[in-house]
Image (spheres, rainbow, N blue to C red):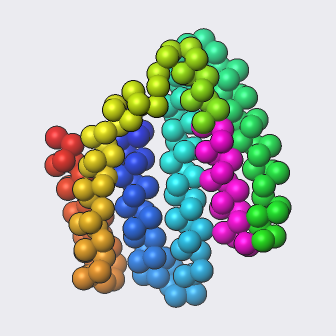
Amino acid sequence: SIILLLAIPATVGFIILADTFTRTILGEDWAVIVGPMQVLAVGGLFWSIGGSVLGATSKAIGEPRWDFYRNTIRTLSFAGLMFPLTSQWGIGGTATAFTISSTISTIFLFGVVHRYLGFSIGTIVTYLTPTILGSLCMAPIIILLDNILSGVVALIIAVFVGLVFYLSVQY
């Protein structure tokens, strides 16, 4: 899926550059949101897997109700986790509640898709191997550039070089 082709490297890149992005674009006063943003990036990846890929698959097999159930599970688990985690960890707890609820609901929908189509996690990992490897190969380049450059131009260069490196590994 094109969504995962983009979502996985974007998540990796965002996790690496969250601190630089926040301090450069938003300023030092916003540095406290770096951790929650990184946690939300992981949650967003699971959200995109569940919604775009598995959700579309549940509709394609004629079972859209499973996507509804996934969303219900996600909403209820988020509602149940948000207050205690936010009370404990502040905005980081809210981000964690979102990530946990997105992960739980995606695992649920994966089980449904597995039941109907027989896909195993191994099949999906095999399918995603080039994307995962490209993202992992891109990461050290972004980390290196992030450590030796600074400012908005450095941020743009790190994103561009990371994208080019990722795509060169893909094709």
Question: Which residue is rendered at x = 60% and y = 68% of the image?
Answer: 36
Q: Position of residue 13 (x, y in %)?
A: 37, 61
Q: Is residue 73 left or right of residue 28?
A: right
Which image quadrant for residue 131? Answer: top left
Q: Is the C terminus in the top left, top right, bottom left or bottom right quadrant? A: top left
From this view, report whether residue 112 is shown above or below residue 13: above
Residue 119 in the image: x percent, y percent?
Answer: 47, 21
127 sits left or right of 167 in the view: right
Q: Quadrant of residue 95?
A: bottom right
Q: Is residue 157 above or below residue 32?
A: above
List x then y, in percent, for residue 46.
54, 45
Residue 96 in the magenta stretch? The answer is yes
Magenta residues (range):
89-106
Count the marks.
Answer: 0
Based on the picture, tell me whether residue 157 belongs to the magenta stretch: no
Residue at left 36%, top 52%? Answer: 9
Question: Hey, which residue is sitting farthest bottom in the picture?
Answer: 28
Residue that appears at 82% across and 63% down: 84
Can see residue 41? yes
- Horizontally, is 2 left or right of 79 in the view? left
